[in-house]
């Protein structure tokens, strides 16, 4: 038996709307807490800057308990943990690279501070300003890195970290050139 009725295509499942990060969301999973910078990423204004400021403060506090080698190990451990946390949090927020995820700023700025220390407040402030410039403006290689690993899943989680690591490298390069020339 044949019918002359047109075939109806099945409806595509509606895409789930992105979630808004809240304190409740942050506390619902350890990965969320890490990726959101222990709450600094929940800042309604400039969460990346808030995360970098939190990283700076945390680094100063950590230097009271850990020596340079131990901080290096902490940074090394923070990279794969951050990759996992950023992947899980981005998936649960349903956004490829949410601005509230600031663990990328945290670990990248820790790396900058670890490599430029010992410097005083003004040297740290210069490192902060340069890092924020490279992270926010995304000139040249940072823009490339930002686009290189877009998407979801582990690749996207790595991409969240990768562009900030390139911004950290650019920051360190400028600081090294400045030290060399002056």
Image (spheres, rainbow, N blue to C red):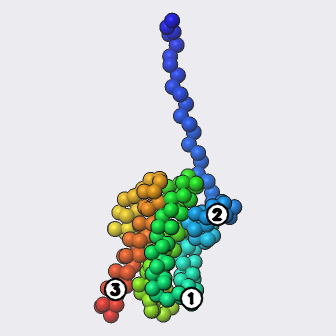
> Of the residues under marks 1 and 3, which one precedes in the sequence?
1
Query: Which residue is located at x 33 percent, y 93 percent?
Result: 182
Give the label on residue 65, or none: 1
Q: Is residue 131 above or below residue 160?
A: below
* Kind of element beneath mark 3: helix
> Of the residues under marks 1 and 2, which one precedes in the sequence?
2
- Residue pointed to by mark 2: 26
Marks 3 and 2 sit apart, C-alpha to C-alpha, by: 37 Å
Cβ atoms at labels 1 and 2 below 8 Å apart? no
Query: Which residue is located at x 58 percent, y 54 percent?
Result: 92
> Of the residues under marks 3 and 2, which one precedes in the sequence?
2
Query: Which residue is located at x 56 percent, y 88 percent?
Result: 65
Marks 1 and 2 sit apart, C-alpha to C-alpha, by: 27 Å
Q: Residue furthest right?
A: 24
Q: Position of residue 42 (x, y in %)?
A: 62, 67
Q: Nearer the viewer, mark 1 or mark 3?
A: 1
Q: Nearer the viewer, mark 3 or mark 2?
A: 2
Residue closer to the observer: 182 or 170: 170
Q: Is residue 145 above or below residue 94?
A: below
Marks 1 and 3 sit apart, C-alpha to C-alpha, by: 27 Å
- Residue pointed to by mark 3: 176
Q: Is residue 95 above or below residue 119?
A: above
């Amino acid at each position: 038996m044949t019918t002359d009725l047109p075939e109806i295509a099945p409806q595509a499942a509606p895409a789930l709307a992105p979630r808004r990060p809240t304190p409740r969301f942050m506390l619902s999973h350890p990965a969320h807490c890490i990726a959101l910078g222990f709450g600094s990423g929940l800042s309604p204004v400039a969460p990346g800057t808030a995360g970098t400021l939190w990283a700076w403060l945390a680094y100063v506090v950590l230097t009271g308990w850990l020596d340079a080698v131990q901080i290096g190990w902490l940074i090394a451990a923070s990279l794969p943990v951050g990759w996992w946390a950023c992947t899980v949090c981005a998936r649960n927020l349903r956004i490829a690279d949410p601005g509230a995820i600031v663990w990328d700023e945290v670990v990248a700025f820790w790396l900058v501070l670890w490599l430029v220390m010992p410097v005083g407040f003004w040297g740290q402030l210069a490192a902060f300003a340069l890092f924020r410039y490279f992270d926010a403006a995304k000139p040249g290689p940072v823009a490339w890195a930002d686009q290189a690993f877009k998407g979801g899943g582990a690749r996207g989680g790595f991409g969240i970290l990768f562009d900030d690591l390139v911004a950290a490298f650019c920051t360190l390069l400028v600081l090294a050139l400045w030290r060399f020339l002056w």
